[in-house]
Image (cartoon, grey):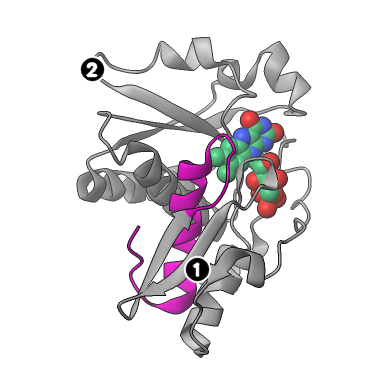
Amino acid sequence: MMTLMEAIDARHSVRAYQDKPVEEEIRRQLEAFTEECNRESGLHIFIRWDDPEGFDSRMAHYGRFRNVRNYIVLSGKETDDFDYICGYWGEKVVLFAQQLGLNTCWAALTFNRKKVRELIPDGETMCMAISLGYGVTQGVPHRNRSVREVTENAPDEAWFAAGVEAALKAPTAMNQQKFLFSLNDGEPFARVKGRGACRTVDLGIAAYHFEAGSGRKVRH
Ligand SMILES: Cc1cc2nc3c(=O)[nH]c(=O)nc-3n(C[C@H](O)[C@H](O)[C@H](O)COP(=O)(O)O)c2cc1C
């Protein structure tokens, strides 16, 4: 299995999938990992296997999604930090899926929200969904903002640079990368910069990447 850092390098959004079903053993491992994430985070992240309806809509087609047969749903009790933790823990599941050889793409808008919302238990809020499966391709690297645009008060330290480098590889809505990493009282700190939809989910995703790259816990 590839390492977490190899998964960060290899992950790109993939929207078109092969017919090939995901093997039982791979399903079992991803389910077990997701359950562990739910226990730690208090979220309710779940996977729908062999259910093409979740990404079967005009919006999904418009979003260039094709043949999505499985997907991850991010759901849970809405708290002040809901969007951030959905990003953080959702990306943890995405990168584990990548380690297992699967491809993914986050979707805030271009999936069948109505259909997927029917799966959400009462009292929970749906954040978004993530397509899952064996991609037709492995995707391509996105364009990046410069290190200067996404940092402030950055220390000249290798661990910080490694954190930022990993964060710049994170998926963000429309590739907006509206996050900012800085050093606050000696600790890495993440916050959103500017306007844009989904930036708090994006921030949680980028923070998880930063932690993986730097080995340091990020506050926000
Ligand atoms: C929070 C979030 C929401 C997203 N929503 C959509 C979406 O609705 N439709 C879509 O096609 N892609 C969506 N994406 C995928 C982004 O467009 C993609 O991550 C970005 O362009 C960077 O490319 P990469 O993931 O290949 O690195 C979303 C990504 C994130 C992180």
* Nearer-the-camera pick, 190 or 114: 190
First of labels 2, 1 by sequence position: 1
Residue 14 within the segment the image draws in magenta = no
The crowd level at tag 2 (other Cα within 10 Å; few <14, some 14-19, many 20+) is few
Image height of 177 relative to 49, above or below: below
Q: Residue at x 49, y 74 (%)?
A: 213
User: Mark 2: which amino acid?
Assistant: Gly
Q: Which residue is drawn at 28% across and 17% down?
A: 121
Label 1, on which residue? 4
* Nearer-the-camera pick, 128 or 6: 128
Is residue 105 visible in this depiction of the protein? Answer: no
Spatial CA distance of label 2 from label 1 is: 34 Å
Image height of 82 relative to 97, above or below: above
Residue lying farthest bottom?
Answer: 157
Label 2, on which residue? 123
| Secondary structure of the residue carrying numbered label 1 | helix
Q: In which quarter of the image is residue 147?
A: bottom right
Is residue 135 visible in this depiction of the protein? Answer: yes
Q: Can you tell me which quadrant of the image ligand 1 is in?
A: top right
Question: Residue 211 location in percent, x, y?
Answer: 42, 69
Q: Which region is colored magenta?
A: 192-220
Q: In which quarter of the image is the C terminus?
A: bottom left
